[in-house]
Amino acid sequence: MKTAKLLAATALVAASGLTVTHAQADELTLCWAAWDPANALVELSKEFEAQSGHTMKFEFVPWPNFADRMLNELNSGGKLCDLLIGDSQWIGGGAENGHYVKLNDFFDKEGISMDDFAPATVYAYSTWPKGTPNYYALPAMGDANGWFYRKDWFEKPEIQEAFKAEHGRDLAPPKTQMELLEIAQFFQEREIDGQKRYGAAIFTERGSEGITMGATSSMYPFGFKYEMTPGKYDMEGAVNSPEAVAGLEFYKELYQTATPPGYTDSYMEQSLDAFKSGQVAMAMNWFAFFPGLYADPDTGGDKIGFFVNPGQAKEASTLGGQGISVVAYSDKQDAALEYIKWFAQPSVQKKWWDLGGYSCHVSVLNDPGFADSAPFASDFLLAMDGVMDFWQEPAYAELLLAMQKRLHDYVVADQGTAKEALDKLIEDWTETFEDEGKL
């Protein structure tokens, strides 16, 4: 029976175009965060199991613990994960520390072209050094920080009338950060359907990455950047520019004047809860959650709308998303590479989008029907045209902790000025880059 099953699996693989390199099927473990797209990937991967004969196991870790768990696993040379869908910021450390298998030769052999994936996702999820044709991951899950709102509240005649009387324009999804603030302040403590509501749910969490991902959603559109010259680590005049200061001051005003009370340590889960419970008119969160939000029986459907992160001086969105890498410590690298080859197929990428994943494949994104395939699809395309990401350096965790502290101290703890917070952040980062030999 074992021989018959193996022959049947081999025939399926041959028909699908995959190459069998093992005498027997393997059990592969794929590691990722525990969220809705991971459940979609389990369903999608059943096709790979049927075609390849391999068995898929999954190790999904809740987001608050994901980075610590997986980075500890990599740094210890652990063998838990054969495949890892790791955050974009990990790519530098994954490459320089030898955690990820370099995929160039494999891509060349199998005819997998990075030109078939959206350029922003190749740059962010796959390359190290940044922008070079050195690939350590296949773009797997496109994502950006976006917004959703109570469409049913926006459309109430009395709400429309009150907003126009106050601001002289129709109430509609904001096109700029300043319009976002005006709308959030308009809804703050407003009574709707007999209950007090609030303006917006934003990210303020300090422990992992929350406030950095949230604040940069305002700071990038105002003009914040990490370096004056890409690759030179010349942060003075970029990190603490007048535009960066204005963006950070804006985020603090949004926090102080238009969020629910006690909202001092919030990230993904708290944002979703605030919206689904009817506390807020608008909320920021990752596009990855939008399919589930739209399907929600209480606040989804006709009650919800979506919009891309508003611009200000420029159009920009905070990048999320991940690439999928083969872990260098795996004893099953050949089988893991089979999974990469299978996942890269356009037909699989189309199914990935249909199931609730965010494909980065241009055949999916450029399909004439894509923009109308979901109520948030067109906003996703806009977001991915203007994404910006945090440092992807090997010392990313230390750099992130510094920014978390400086932003939280200023925005939530109300310590010092925005300029002082960003000046101190430059000092923190300078010390890190000096220790790394980059300065």
Image: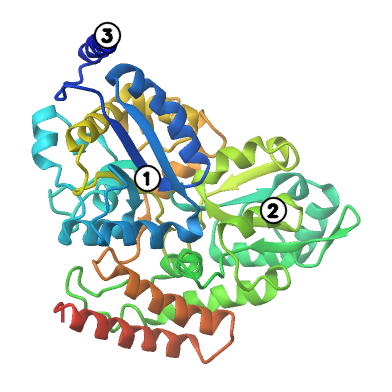
Query: Looking at the image, which residue is at 30% across and 17% down?
Result: 51
* Residue 182 x/y as whole percent: 66, 66
323 displayed left or right of 273: left
Mark closer to the chain start, 1 or 3: 3
379 displayed left or right of 130: right
Q: Please name the residue that numbered disc 1 is placed on.
A: 31
Bin the neighbour count of mark 3 within 10 Å (Cα to Cα): few under 14, some 14-19, many 20 and up. some
Q: Please name the residue that numbered disc 3 is placed on.
A: 8
Mark closer to the chain start, 2 or 3: 3
Q: Amino acid at mark 2?
A: Phe
Q: Amino acid at mark 1?
A: Cys
Q: Assign a secondary structure to mark 1.
A: strand
Mark closer to the chain start, 2 or 1: 1
The image quadrant of residue 194 is bottom right
Q: Are marks 2 and 3 in contact (CB under 8 Å)?
A: no
Q: Name, please, the residue furthest toward the right.
A: 194
Bin the neighbour count of mark 2 within 10 Å (Cα to Cα): few under 14, some 14-19, many 20 and up. many
- Quadrant of the drawing holding the C terminus: bottom left
Q: Nearer the viewer, residue 62 or 257?
A: 62
Can you see residue 367?
Answer: no
